[in-house]
Amino acid sequence: MSDEVVLLDFNLSMFGIRVRIALAEKGIKYEHKEEDLVNTKSALLLQMNPIHKKIPVLIHNGKPICESLIIVEYIDEVWKDKTPLLPTDPYQRAQARFWADFVDKKVHEVAKKIWTGKVGEHEKDKEELIVNLKQLEEVLGDKPYFGGDTFGFLDVAFIPFHKWFYSYETVGELKVDCPKLNAWAKRCLQRESVSKYLSDEKEVYEFVLSYRKKIGVD
């Protein structure tokens, strides 16, 4: 009996892109169902994720798994005969999880305050975002990928955000000067799993402008 895999998703979601990349890395076939997050969430999404009511949701043989990092780990564990995403060493696994969580809390949450806030009101957030990105650049060091020579869990967790840098810079009136991260992103984009699903930065920017207008900050 073959696995039935369905992904509830939104095209520009960096969290959904994580899952798409992980599935592609593993070569898993799945049905993609696009959600309209701006207007009405589907009955299926509300049924499968009644707690947070958010995408992405991976439905595997009828059972839902929610939250993108948890989903990526689940994919890695279930299809473990495919190329692993998490390191085998327990300490390295813990570090990958730590820094993936750092991306969510110290990049996404800080940056969201900037691109959803009024221009000029988030100077401290802008400073913190740059510091946090520089911290990730230090973690990367001179390695090809965050996992060393191998594209892995932290790369999957972070690469979807790279196409949002343009919006951070333009809306926040700041400069993201992280050459090692830019070089890393170019290496990641050489992978079909990444280049196929990563958002177009101008499309992201248009979404950000539309969202800002909707919430009344522009």
Image (cartoon, helix red, strand yellow):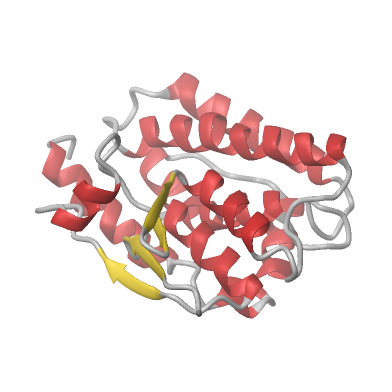
The image quadrant that residue 23 belongs to is bottom right
Residue lying farthest top? 124
Q: Position of residue 44 (x, y in %)?
A: 20, 57
Residue 134 visible in the displayed image: no
Is 83 positioned to the left or the right of 23 in the image? Answer: right
The image quadrant that residue 131 belongs to is top right
Q: Position of residue 178 (x, y in %)?
A: 69, 47
Residue 105 visible in the displayed image: yes
How many numbered marks are there?
0
Q: Decide: is 88 above or below 119.
A: below
Q: Decide: is 177 above or below 190.
A: above
Query: Looking at this view, is 172 or 24 the one in front?
Result: 24
Q: Quadrant of the C terminus?
A: top left
Query: Looking at this view, is 161 or 213 the one in front?
Result: 161
Residue visible at 75% across and 51% down? 86
Q: Position of residue 182 (x, y in %)?
A: 68, 58
Q: Decide: is 111 above or below 32.
A: above
Q: Position of residue 6 (x, y in %)?
A: 38, 68
Is 135 positioned to the left or the right of 123 in the image? Answer: right
Residue visible at 74% across and 69% down? 187
Is 100 positioned to the left or the right of 152 in the image? Answer: left
Residue visible at 52% across and 51% down? 71
Is 3 positioned to the left or the right of 31 in the image? Answer: right
